[in-house]
Image: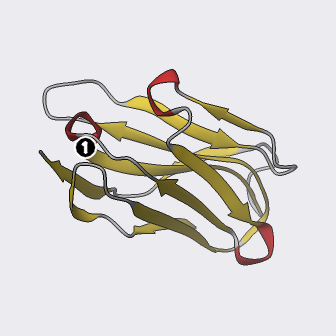
Amino acid sequence: QVQLVESGGGLVQAGGSLRLSCTASGTFFSINAMGWYRQAPGKQRELVSTITSSGSTNNADSVKGRFTISRDNAKNTVYLQMNSLKPEDTAVYYCSAAVQTVTTPIYMNYWGKGTLVTVSS
């Protein structure tokens, strides 16, 4: 069983910063891509940033230049540094990871339960 636990969300004023963390735990062989998605009230979940095991990143246009994704493979942890936050960044942020487990030879996607980020104007 694989668990992803996010932390670091909260309330911040526009222009402020937050750092999200997500750690994978459980029994597994390896983690490939990790990423962050978000879902604002009344909207569909959307990609924010992803990072491969080798460090290649992909970011949504709406966060380029403001958000930075990174990971610590030794800690099975992915981070999202969010700067210059805007009210439209308000959403529940979900962590995702492609994980190869003991019982499943292919990489399967796992999700955390989410952490709320609220940006006030």
| Left or right, residue 45 beside residue 32 | left
Q: Residue at x 77, y 44 (%)?
A: 52
Closest to the observer: 60 or 54? Answer: 60
| Left or right, residue 115 beside residue 30 | left
**What kind of residue is marked 1?**
Ala
Q: Position of residue 57 (x, y in %)?
A: 72, 38
Q: Residue at x 45, y 69 (%)?
A: 5
**Residue most extreme to the right:** 54
- Rendered view: 40 above or below 44: below
Closest to the observer: 97 or 28? Answer: 97
- Under tag 1, what secondary structure? strand
Q: Position of residue 91 (x, y in %)?
A: 25, 43
The residue at which mark 1 appears reads as 91
| Left or right, residue 21 beside residue 88 | right
Closest to the observer: 112 or 70? Answer: 70
Can you say which quadrant of the picture contains the N terminus? bottom right
Can you say which quadrant of the picture contains the C terminus? top left
Q: Look at the image and name its color scheme.
A: secondary structure
Q: Position of residue 109 (x, y in %)?
A: 59, 44
